Amino acid sequence: MLNKNFFLLFILFVNLGFSQSECYNSDFSEGTFSGWEGYSGTYSRPKRDKGFKQFRHTIITEPTLDPRTCDMLVTIPPGETFSAKLGNESVRSEAEVLVYSMNVTPENSIFLYKYAIVVEDPDHLPKEQPQFSVAITDVDGKIIDPLCGDYKVYAGQPEQNFNTCEYIDPKTHNVRIVKWTNWKTVGLNLSAYIGTTVKIEFTTKDCALHEHFGYAYISAKCTKLKANLKACANDLSFDLIAPYGFSKYLWTYLGQPVGTNSSTTSLALADYPEGAIFECTMTAFSNSNLCESKIEIILTKPTKITPLFEAKTSCNIAQIELNPLIFENQTVTNEPNVKWNWDFGDGSTSIEKTPKHIYTNSGQYNVNLTATSESGCTFNLSKTILINNNPILEPILDPDQNFCNQNATIGTINVGAQNLKWYSSLTSTEELTVSTVLVDKTTYYAAVYDNGCSGKRIGFTASVSNLPAPIGNAMQYFCTINKPTISDIDVKGNGIKWFKNLTDTNALITSTALTNTTYYAAQTDLQTGCESKDRLTVNVVLEDPANILPASYKKELCLDDELLIRALRDNNTTMIFYDSENAVIPLSENTPVTNGSTYYASIFDSKTNCESTKRSAVLVSIIPCQLVIYNSITIDGNDLNDHFVIKNIEFFPENTVEIYNRFGQLVYHTAKYGINENYFYGEANAGEVFQKSKKLPTGSYFYVINFKKNNSSGNNLQKGFLYISNNE
C-alpha cells in the first residue's frame, strides 16, 4: 500500500552524522534524560512503571566497545557524542521504553534517529523473540499511521543485515548466539502533522520466555525537509539533490525518468529550459509497508558570482609589511548567504567578507578569494600584491615600568613623545584603545604611527601589581555610645583605605563616624602606593539598646539605707550612673549620694555589650524610714494625746493600720494612715463588737502596722500594744 504523506527512511550507512538538532536534548547532549519520558515493565506490559531505572535506562557519555558484539559495536554512533542504552543483559522478560514528545514545525518535521540492536537469537516464534520497536503516536498514545508509523525488528527477522557474535556464558558454560546490527539511521517525515504534538516511542524487550536478552542503543535529531538545486553559471550541468537516505529514488521530468536513481543526479543545462519542474519520488521500506514521498524542484537561472576585491591601506607610502591592509570585497552577486574564503598567500586565511590582514614580511603574495553560494557553486579570483619593506623604525620603550592594577591601562604606559598604536599581537589588525586595561604578565605590541602608516612592532610585557583585598569579617558590630569611626573597623592588611562604594576614588578619613551602612576597604602597597583592585565589603551595625527607664523619676532612699550610687539601681536592670547628662566617666558604685541631687542612668545590654545613649534623670530623695510609735491615747474631751501617734508614717503613704482588742477582735482598720488627718481617735470602725462607731473602753489593745519604704521594696511590718484610757 502506498502512503504519500508519511514516510520512514532507512539508512544502512554507518558514517552519516547529524547536524545540530532542532529538538531539545533528543540526542541526549545534556547528558540527561531531560525532555524524555521513561517506562519499564514486562514483555506483555512494557509501560507498567513510569520513571527511569538504573541499568535499564542509561546515558552513554564515553564511547566503548560492546562486549556482546565481540567488541565490534561502538556504543555511540559516529559523529555523535552521546547515546542512550535501552535495556540490559538481564533475561527476565523485561521491557524498557523511552518516549520523546515534540511539537512539529516546518523546522523540525524530519525526525532522524540512529539505532543499533543487540539481541540473542532464540528458536522461538517471532512474537516471543527479543525485539526493538518504534511507534509514532498522538498525545493519547494512538499510533498515527499503522503502515509507516509502527516499526519492529526482532531477533530472527530476515533481511536485517544482522552480524553474529558467539560467547561462552560464564554461568552455564553454554555457547550463546548474539545478533547485532551496525548503527542504522531511520528518518520520519512528520510534515503532515505540523502544528500538532506527536510522540516517538522506542521499546526494547527480552524474549517472552525469560531466556534471552535484548537491548538497543539510540540517538535522535530533528531537521527540516529540504531539496537543493545546484546550477552554476560556470558549469555545463546542474545537480538535483534530494534528502539523503531513502532506499529508492526516481527523478522525472514531464512524467519521463531522467538522470540516475540516486539522491543526487546531474543533468545537462542545455537540455532543459529555465523554469523546468523536476519531481523526485523517494521510497522507504519498513516491515513490508511501502511508503513514498515526493519533492518538486524548479530549475532556476544558474547562480552567478563575480568575485572582485581591492587591497587598500591608510599608509601614504604604499603597501608595506606590518601595516594593516583592508581587502575590500567588491564582488557582484544577487545571491544571499554567500560564504567567503580568503587565502592571503602567506599561510593565513579568513572567512570574513571584508577582512583585514597584516603581512609580516615584504615580498609578492598571491591572494585568492573564493565565493561559495548556498547551493555549493564556487567562483574564484586571484591577484598578486606587492608588500614593501617598512621604513618606520621600532618604538623605544622602557621595559621597567610598573603599574597599579586599579588604574593600569594602555594609556598609562610611558612612551614619551612617540605617537604609538597598540595591538594585542604582532599580526593583529585591531588597534587597542588607550582605555584597554593592562593584565599582569601580558605582552602588548606597539608601533610608531606616522602619516597613516604603522611601523615595526615591539612587544611590551606589563608588570601590574595584584594586591589582594584586605581580610576581615563581612559583618561588624559597634556600640553607638562609643562613637565608633572608620579606624575602629577590624581588618587585616597594609595601608588600609576605606571608601563609600566599590568604585569611589576618594578615601574616607579615619575619623569618619560610622553609620549603619556598608563600607569598602582596599589594601595599599606602602612602597608603590598601588591599591588592591578588589575591595573588602564590610556591613556595619550600630547597637544602641533601648532605655526602658522613664525619662526622669524620683528615687527615695531611707536615712538608714546605704546612701551610695549602687542603692539607686533597679534589681532587674543593669544601670550605669553619671553625674551629668553628657558625662563620659561613669560614677563608681561606692560614690555617695546626697538628698536633692540628680544623677543620670543609662541601660547596659549584656547581649550586645553596649550601653544606651539615652540617659534617665534620677532625683534622689532621702527620707526617714523608721516609725516611732507612741503607744497610749487618752479620751477625755481635750486635744492632748487624743489620737494614736505614729511618727514618720506620712513618708509611707502606702500603709495599713489594724487594731485588735484583748479578745483578738478587729476593732479598727484603715489605709493611708496619717495622710489627710487620717488618725485613730479611739473610736472603733471595724469588726462586730458592740463598741463599733463608739469610743473604745479603757484597756490594752494590739496594733499591726503594714507599710512600704519605697515602691520597689516589700512590705514592712511593725506590731505592738496600745493602751487606751477612756475618761469620758
Image (cartoon, rainbow, N blue to C red):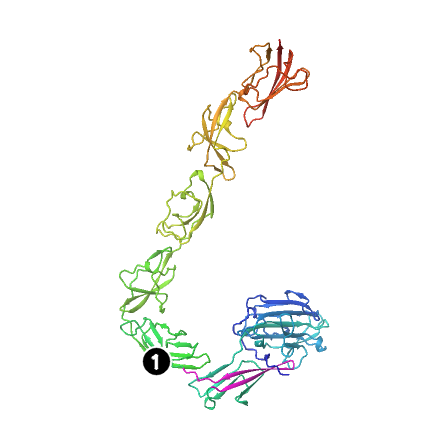
Q: Pick whichever, 80 or 107, lies toward us.
A: 107
How many numbered tags mark residues here? 1
User: According to the image, label 1 marks what residue?
Assistant: 383
Quarter holding the N terminus?
bottom right
Considering only vertical position in the picture, is 78 above or below 687? below
Residue 155, quarter of the rendered image: bottom right
Residue 618 visible from this viewpoint: yes
Residue name at image x 37 percent, y 74 percent? 354
Relative to residue 562, is residue 320 drawn left or right? Answer: left
Residue 395 falls in which quadrant of the image?
Answer: bottom left
Q: Is residue 423 magenta?
A: no
Per the picture, the main secondary structure of the magenta-coloured stretch is strand
Most foreground residue, 446 or 433: 433
Stretch in magenta: 275-304
Type of amino acid at the residue the image marks with label 1: Lys
Q: Secondary structure at mark 1?
A: strand
Q: Quick one: quadrant of the C terminus? A: top right
Residue 197, how many percent across, how many down? 59, 71
Residue 87 appears in the rendering: no
Residue 182 x, y percent position in the rendering = 60, 77
Residue 172 position within the rendered picture, expressed as x and y whole percent measured from the top left: 71, 71
Residue 289 belongs to magenta span: yes
Locate residue 430 relative to residue 613 in the image: left or right: left
